[in-house]
Image (cartoon, rainbow, N blue to C red):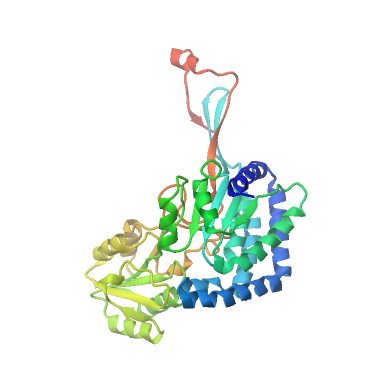
Amino acid sequence: MDFENIAKTAKTAALGIADISADLKNSALLKIADNLEKDKAKIFEANKKDLTDAESLVISGEISKSTFNRLKLDENKMRDMIQGIRDVAKLEDPVNKKLFVRELDEGLTLYKVSCPIGVLGIIFEARPDVIAQISSLAIKSANAVILKGGKESINTNKTVLGIINETLDSIDGFPKNVLQQVFTRDDVAQMLKCDKYINLIIPRGGNKLVKYIKENTKIPVLGHADGICHIFADETADLEMAIKVIVDAKTQYPSACNSVETLLIHEKFPETEKLLAALQLAEIKLVDNPDTWAFEHGDTTLAFKKVKNLDEAIEHINTYGSGHTDSIITKNIENAEKFMNKVDSAGVYFNASTRFADGFRYGLGAEVGISTNKTHARGPVGLEGLTIYKYKLIGQGHIVKDYVDGTKHFHHKDI
C-alpha cells in the first residue's frame, strides 16, 4: 500500500473512532496492557536484536551513544510503559467535554466541546516505549496515528505494535487502521506532504530531525527541537539540596531531553566550591566554555557559569535555553516566584529536578512528547493536548437577519 492510501485509511479510521464509547476505549487499553505484559519475553527478545544491530550503527557514527542508550527497553521501562497504559484507561475521557455553554438568546445555545484532532503523524528516534505511549493516548483521545520509528528500533516497534493491533482486531466494534506503522525515509517525505489527510505532526528526536520536519511540511508541527534545561543555584540555596537535585537532573538519565545541561550559580552563593566538588565526585564533567551554553550534551557533561544576580540568570536562560524546563534552587520565595514568572519555558520549577518534566510523572498517564510551542499544547503533551474543540450551536429556526434588523437581541448568558 502506498503512503497516500495509508493516510486515507487513517482518515477513515479517525472518523470511525471519533464517537466510540469511553467504555470500549478503556476496555481496549486494559486488554492491550495485559497482552503486552503476557508477551514481555517476545518484546525483550526483539529489543535485544535491535541493541545488537545498533552497536554497529554507533561505531559507524550513524547514531549517537545517547540514542543507543534510549533504545534499551529494560524491566523498569517495560513496567512504566504498561502501567502508563493502565493509567490512561483510568483518566477521564477527554472527548465531548463541554468547555463552556452560552445562551446567545432564548432558545439559541452555543456549546464549546472537546473533540479529537484527527490523524496524527508521529516520527521518533529510538525510545521503543513511545509506541505504547502514543497508541494508548491516541485510543483514549479518539485519534488515528501513523507511526514512523527509527531503523535502530524496528524490531521492537514491529513487535509492540503487532501485539497492540492484534488486541484491537479481537475487540468487536473497534475500527480498523487506527494505529498504523511505516518504516522508510520515503514514507517520512510522503507523510510531510500529506496535509490533505494528516492534521498534526509530532516529532520526537534530535534537533536535526525536528528542524528538517518543520522546514519540509505545511502540516502543523508540535514538539521541541532541543532540551537545553537549566538549574540556577541562588544565593540562598541549600547546599545539600542543590547537590541532590543537580546530580539527579544530570545523572539519573543523562540522555533524556529533560536532563539539565547548564548550571548557573549566583556569584554570592557561599558554597560554590563545595557544590562543584560534589558534582565532580558524582562523575559529572564540568565545563565553563561559552560555546556549550546552547548545546545539548546528552551525557554527564554539565556547563556552568557564575551570574551576578537573579536577573542575569533569567536573561541567560531566556537567551540560551530551549523553552523546555528550568529550575531554581533557593530559600527565597520571592526570587522563586520571579524566576517562575519570567523564565519563558514550558516547565519552571522551584527546588525540584528538571527530570520531573514527563507526562507519566505529571499524572497524564503517558505523553506523545514535550512541546515548547506557545500555542495549543505546551510541556508534556497528554490527552488534553491531543484534543481540540468545536462549536455546536442549537437553535429553533433562528436567523441572523432578526438580529441585524433589531427584531431580536443577543443576551450572551453563560449557563
Q: Tell whether 12 sits left or right of 108.
A: right
Is 34 above or below relative to 137?
below
Residue 38 sits in which quadrant?
A: bottom right
Horizontal side, residue 329 vs residue 101: left or right: left
| Count of numbered badges drawn on the protein | 0
- Viewer-proximal residue among 194 and 69: 194
The residue depicted at 21 percent of the width and 70 percent of the height is: 308
State the image coordinates of residue 137 (x, y, percent, origin top left). Answer: 60, 55
Residue 287, how many percent across, how many down? 30, 78
Which residue extends farthest left?
A: 308
Residue 384 locus on image (x, y percent): 54, 50
From the viewer's side, name the closer residue of 400 and 14. 14
Q: Is residue 170 visible?
A: yes
Point 45% across, 56% down: residue: 223
Residue 328 is at least partly visible in this image: no
* Image x and y of residue 353, in percent: 43, 70
Residue 58 against residue 12 in the figure, above or below: below
Q: Nearer the viewer, residue 49 or 292?
A: 49
